[in-house]
Image: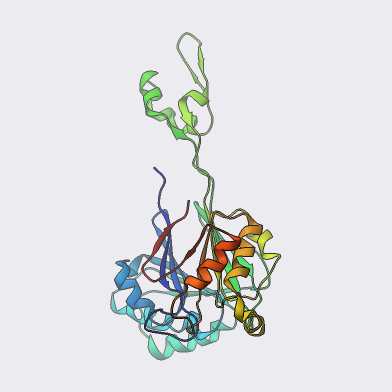
Amino acid sequence: MMEPFRVHILGCGSALPTLKHNATAQIIEVRGKMFMVDCGEGTQISLRRSHINFTRVQAVFISHLHGDHCFGLMGMISTFGMLGRTATLNIYAPAAFEHILKEQLELFCSGLEFEVVFNAVDTTRQQVIYEDRSLSVESIPLEHRVPCCGFLFREKPTQPHIRREMIDFYKIPISQIQNIKNGADWVLEDGTVVANQRLTSPADPPRSYAFCSDTRYMPHLAEIVKGVDLLYHESTYDKANEAKAAKYHHSTAAQAAQVARDAGVGKLLLGHYSARYENEKLMLAEAREIFPNSELSNEGLVFDVK
């Protein structure tokens, strides 16, 4: 059974909060670890509604310094303090955010019992900015009105699965299991070699998720996110407002679908909807004309990366 890799949508509106949508925020759940991407206003309430344990968020990735992507962060850090958090919280964000964060922490959050560590992200480069034994996170350079990047979450390859019935049949000791996972064959007492392929089944393929925050349409983005299982791409406008999208360095749903199609991704999530729309069905229809496996993100929805 594969360990969870899920995207929890906490907010998918654009700059103007509405009664329907909160500003951008997501939780990326990977193998028991929780990461937050962007933290707009209303994020704490969405966290409560999603029944996600606040204390499990170990890092926050901020795509850019527009308020609808970061105004909720200081309130959340303050809440962490009131809840008695002790674990270090890592913040990954454009370099300009460091002094703002430091001043706000000194003003609003003096006396925290946990450390807030700032990690500057160069939004002009694609590079690994976080890594552990099971996961890496890369920055994705985007084109917006201020320095901005997306984030690419990639699982690392896992080892093959042990076929328990074969291990029992050949009475292989537990001490040898790791060797077999590493590719070793098993030799019986009579010298017969049991091939590793009979003792294992293939490892699960690594999964990947790309979060592409505010950006104008970038045809070359398809190369960066090529083949990811799940792609979130901002889709602020419909086709009729393509000129407005270009003016403000945003994308239409159709343009997001073009990236998804050209990249050959598994599924596309639309989001960052302009407050002008009563509903987003029009944008979903326009995206599906180009890339059929498109879905609307919405607060409270959870998407499995598979």
Q: Is residue 11 shown left or right of residue 61? A: left
- Position of the N terminus, as image quadrant, is top left
In the depicted structure, whether residue 18 falls above or below residue 114: below
Residue 69 location, x and y as percent?
A: 49, 79
**Residue 196, position as x, y percentages in the image:** 51, 25
Q: Quadrant of residue 44?
A: bottom left
Tell me where residue 104 appears, x and y as whole percent: 45, 88
- Out of 214 and 252, give the one closest to the viewer: 252
- Coloring applied to the structure: rainbow
Q: Using the rendered image of the protein, determine whether residue 69 is visible from the camera's viewpoint.
A: yes
Exactly how many numbered labels are in the figure? 0
Relative side of 73 to 270, left or right: left
The residue at 66%/81% (across/down) is: 246
Q: Residue at x 40, y 49 (%)?
A: 3
Report if residue 85 is visible in the image: no
In the image, 86 versus 129, the foreground residue is 129
Looking at the picture, tell me which residue is in the foreground, 120 or 243: 243
Q: Residue 55's x, y, as percent? A: 34, 68
Which residue, as the protein is rendered here, is positioned at the far top?
190
Q: Residue furthest bottom?
A: 107
Residue 285 in the image: above or below residue 170: below
Q: Residue at x 43, y 85 (%)?
A: 17
Q: Is residue 218 above or below residue 229?
A: below
Q: Is residue 35 above or below residue 267?
A: below
Side (left or right) of 18 relative to 64 = left
Q: Quadrant of residue 223?
A: bottom right
The single residue placed furthest to the right in the displayed view is 220
